[in-house]
Amino acid sequence: MRSRIDALVVVRHGGDDLAKTIESLRAQTLPPARVLAIDASGSGRFGDQLDALFSDGFEPSTVLSLPQKASFPAAINAALAMLFPEGTPAGDDQWLWLLREGIVCEADALKRLASSVEGAPLIKIAGPKQVMTQRPGYLRELGESMTPWGRRVPLAERELDQGQYDRLSDVLAVGEAGMLVHAESLRGVGGFDEALAALDSGLDLSVRIRLQGHRIVVVPRAVISVPSSSADAHADKKLSGFRHEYLAAQSWLYRRLVYAPAWALLPVALTLVPWALVRALGHLVVKRPDRMVLEPLAAVGTLGRLRAVFSARIKLRETRTTGWDAIDALRIDSRDVIRKRAIAREESLARREEKAVMSPAPRALPQLAWLSLALTAVTAGVFGAWWGATALIGGGALPLAASFRTLWAGAFTVIPTQWGFDIPPLPADPASFVLALVGSLTWWAPTSALVWMVVAAVPVAGAIAWWGFSHIFRQPWTVTVVSFVWAVSPAFLFAVVEGRMGAVLAHLALPWLLGALLTAHQSWQRVGAASLAAIVVTAGAPVLFPAVVIAVIALVVVRGWGSPLQMLGGVLPFVIVPSLLLAIPRFLGWWQSAEGRWWQSGGVLFADPGVSVPYGPAPWWSLILGIPSTVPVGVSEVVPQGVTSLLVLVAMAAMALGVVTAIVSLGFGRNTTSLSFAGLFALGLITATAAPSLFSGFSGGEATAVWPGSGVSLIVLGVLVGAGSLLDRVWFSDALGNPRNAFPQWWARLTAGVLVGASLTIPALVGIQVWSGNGIVQPASAARTLPAFVSAEAAAMPHVGTLVISPTNSGYAATLERGAGETLATSSTLVRGRSLELTAFDEDLARLAAMLVRPSSADPLPLLEEYGIRFVLIEDDRGSEASLALSRQPGFVSASSVEAGQLWQVPEVSLPQEPEVTVPLNLWNQLFLVSLAMVAVLAVPTERRVKAAGAGRDDTIAPLGEETADND
Amino acid sequence: MTDHTPRHGTAQLAARTLGAVGSTLTIALAGLVTALGLPSGVVAALQGPVPELPVIEVLPAEPDRMLVCMGPALSFGSEGARVMAYGAPSETLAGSTITTTVITDTTVTDGFALEATLTENPPVVVSQPVEAGVLAATSAQLVSNLNVAGFAVSECQIPERELWLVGGDTSTGRQTAISLVNPSDVQALVDLDVWGAQGPILAPLGQGILLPPQSQRVLSLSGLAPGETSPVVRVSSDSVGVVASMHSTIVRGLEADGLSVNGSQPVPSTLRVVTGAYTPPEEVIGPIKGKDGYRDVGAVLRLLAPESDADVRITVKAPGADDSVIEATLVAGETTDLLLDEFNTGDIAVIAESDHPIVAALRSSVGTDARTDTDWVGSAHSLVGETAFAVPSSGEARVSFVNRGEEAIMVTLDNREVVVPARGLVTRPVAAGAHTVRSAQPVFAAVSVRGETVMDSFLVLPSSQPQSSVLVSVR
């Protein structure tokens, strides 16, 4: 019995694609008995085109115009209802060939499909081999299956068709495109499930047919070429990978609900969203944060379609005649699923390796080891005197915290107990959190971590810079030279020697941020790394915040042309948001304290964290040449002024050479380096020149400004990127390994030599200062800023107050300190830069100081009691007026008397028994921690590092250029 | 420059050109903007001028004015270990709302008691709030018993951290007791340094004397400098101000004959003015001087340049006589006693001008064959503004004013005006009771109180100036 085959063509956008499909139908060696064109556009506008196409002798043909826009399954169902109305049985030999416009069938496609079903009454569906229209010879689909969990798995990947699947026959399912289906069976199972409009309608139909005990085959020799996936066809456009993933997840979840046994339905439905969240975390762990939102979205979307689920379940229950064993046998088992994923990973790695050949990462060994060794020698020569100190005190250097607990107590909030005991907490500086992380490295004595960080700053900066620059340059020697110059740059050494912890952190993290940002488009791991680096940079030097935000946005705009979704939706928020979340509480605190006059206290917003150290400002051209300020005090006492100036001039000259080289590189360089140089230079210059004008509070009675050194670090980074890019173009051997010794090679040797040699002048200068003991920062054997007596008592009474009175030009300065003195964990820029309006606290303290430094009949005890002050430290000599006045105070016991200060104890004062105040994390802190956890997971270096085969050249292998996601 | 060719193609080239031009423009723009000073200018314009750290001006609450009086006349008993007080002094006060308290913590025993009981008349502390105006007090005591005989007057003193006591004698028959009083609520550690005619005297016993709050301690100077005819003592306290006075007694043969209590004088300076001293005419005192055991009856000026050698020019003034001038050279650390016998007599003043800081005091005596009395008077304070003094009711009192200026000055003494000529000395008798002195220019003043065989003198002390306000900045 010969089958009667009707071809159904679903038309949704018409045009040339439709004509091609009709053309290929007409060319079939076994023509369909009838062609039914279904105009599913909803407007009937293709009626004329179809009539024209069918007019030249395609008989018989029918055009069915649907009243509204319909999906492929709906259109087929409508056609089915028209062809075989209720009650009229479709003949047992009646088959339907389901096509949509754009599909071009090889001439014998129908014939081979038909012959496969003939004489095999159990076979109710036959599917063709789908190949890609755009890439001839590549498979699109050849049969489908499911995982044990019900997810659709194509049996054939998107791969070159070499006949490797041509032996396939019985399959679990075939796609709906080009499917030859038995009409009565189709009707018997209730047609397509219209809820699966975009994806998986063929799979679902196949499952239901199979559950009636029928068979489904794929016919590899019947070939049709399909231009787009069913989802793309449904949407009438090329959908993004994200949309595809979403649709696949949604139809999968939908089918799970439909196929689940009745008893399992409720548990499955209830766990849908939690399970999706777990899977989202899984996506994060495997570095696909872009897929994170999609699973929960799909779960929620599926829950919104419960009506469709129930009607589908009813339909399935009514039509099912056999058990699920029939399906299970044909599922792909888990091991195969894992194998398939592994293959996909290998493929993507291979693709990246192909790309990597164009810009190979320089080999780390042995250059990195030599660099570290050289920089360790430099740091030993410069900062060796600080080796083994318990703490560094002076300038910006303070003890970090007394204990691990106090370290973290100050990570997010600071309670300025020096203003009294009932003071509300203030948000801490972002740097407090970063420093808390640093301090946790030596949790038993947090301050030691800080000392180690400072002592090892130079080699650490070199190593981090090596990592960063290795993503920009191709030759190890360039990376090494540039990293060396970076690690001993004057701005960095000045920051270290003046104890500017924030600036040191920022300088350490800047190349990390740059390297990660410039390669962020390649991997999510780099996005995570960039985000962490951005947190460190913006926390360490808030003045760099505008520059970082502008740079990231500029990068996203420039790079966004290539991969807009990842850049705009991924890089931008992932890089900036954690830093912003960390900074927002302080911003709000600042905004509140600014009381609407934000423009006047902008400097406080950008204030360097910790202690602000006064500096001598330098002219703008000196900033360009890498010198951020006048030489730190203490140098002049050891080195003659002339020698100092000469050394600084040499350093400036080297930097000038770097700037010139960088500018020349604009004529040769890649856009990445040119734009990086220009951007960093411009942002750095503006930051550095604006910084000295930003008033950021008082340090001892002196108004201080934001340090320009962080901006100078940006300039230096830019110049090194530019200069390095030119050096990086010089190869010392040709492709065959023969040495080259022409002008470029000699020029490169000379330039690199001058840069490295001259960069050692500032370390020499700083080293003399450190070793002579004249520096601002001094190594100390105890982590305290107050006398030992106070520190000992602070061990028992952490909130014991010490009134520190020091003479100034016009009178006295009074500050109240708690415990063993100020620590970095308790310092706050909001406290330092607080409003200049006098508070009750100011007046109380001034009154108290006045009655102590002068003979007075007033009784200081009530005020001492109120503020919990048990110690008074006069920073003046023993015979000074203030010390003498204090010695007349009854109840004051002289506790220690050294040249630097006279300490008096007031044993009568009792401290209020203070309940342990723990400030809960606010919403912003929690959000920050969540975002930090996310980017930290992303940044975990689990990705296999792409190894370049060898020294590559620009013009080696062209990229494949096509993303081949799984589901399109 | 390089051996490898960039990727070619129009799109590549265009992108690279665009990039290079864009980069150059960015750098040039940034440089231009910076050279024009725009970033700092904009920030500075928005921010306004850099603020000054607010400074709070606090006017300290003035402590009460406080004076410590000398207490009863002191002498060491025959066994030399126990210090005895004889009788009670009487205080004359000049002030409006005066509070008097007593230093009860003392080691002085009652010289008239048979048992070693503590004296019932320890030194008193006189205090008055600053608002109540000037304050002065004077103690006076006339003693005549086997151990001590003579007349003692001393101003009640302001506590200080460094005090100089010039006077006394520890040779045979002479006793000098040093009374130290700590009137404050805080203990003091006091060091006593002693100089003598042979230079500084090493006196470890005088170091680190603990004066508990509100206490009096008495030392015998002979314990520190035995057999010293011309001692000078510096009392220095480590913390609070203390008061020290020197009680000098003389025993000739077996008879007590002479008493003087002198307070401290200002820290060494290059100008010393000693006034308020009376030297009797030679015809009265001359015969006594010649007697055996009366070698310390003449007028003597004791000088010390503690730190460095000094050339001193000494002018002796007496009313109605020309100034006499002596030049002397002092060896650092060695006390010098200059006899002033051949100079004028009466209410004299001695002005010592030196090229290095010195201290100076004058001893003089009055008396008859039967009985004499000695007076030590220290260098006077320079007085400016208003102050007061109190004159005891015994004896004849005369106040002397010395003007060191080149112009005559007007001193208001109890609303009467006294003109003190340039570089001159004026003496006025004063009645017992409170007196005020006001002067716009520096003037030196001291009061001598005397009878036929009794004499002592006291200094007019300046009243402390109110403190200026303190500027405190709080951060």
Image: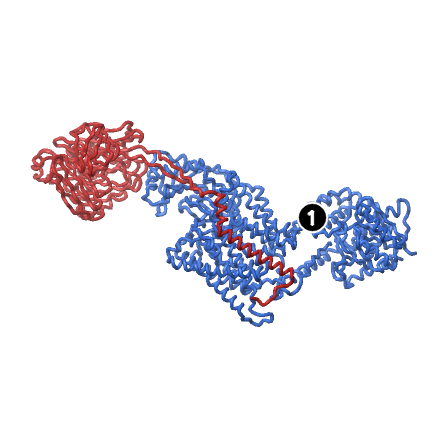
How far across and down, in percent of the image, does residue B76 sit?
Answer: 19, 37
How far across and down, in percent of the image, does residue A763 sit?
Answer: 44, 59
Q: Quadrant of the N terminus of chain A?
A: bottom right
Left or right: A215 as drawn, with respect to A755? right
Q: Quadrant of the C terminus of chain A?
A: bottom right
Crowd band around label 1 with a 10 angstrom C-alpha radius: few (<14), some (14–19), many (20+): many
Residue at position x 57%, y 49% from top? Answer: A549
Res A445 visible: no
How far across and down, in percent of the image, does residue A123 sit?
Answer: 86, 55
Q: Pointer 1: what residue? A: A295
Res B67 visible: yes
Left or right: A120 as drawn, with respect to A265? right
What color does chain A have in the rendering?
Answer: blue
Q: Chain of mark 1?
A: A
What color does chain B have in the rendering?
Answer: red
Q: Is residue A809 above or below residue B426?
A: below
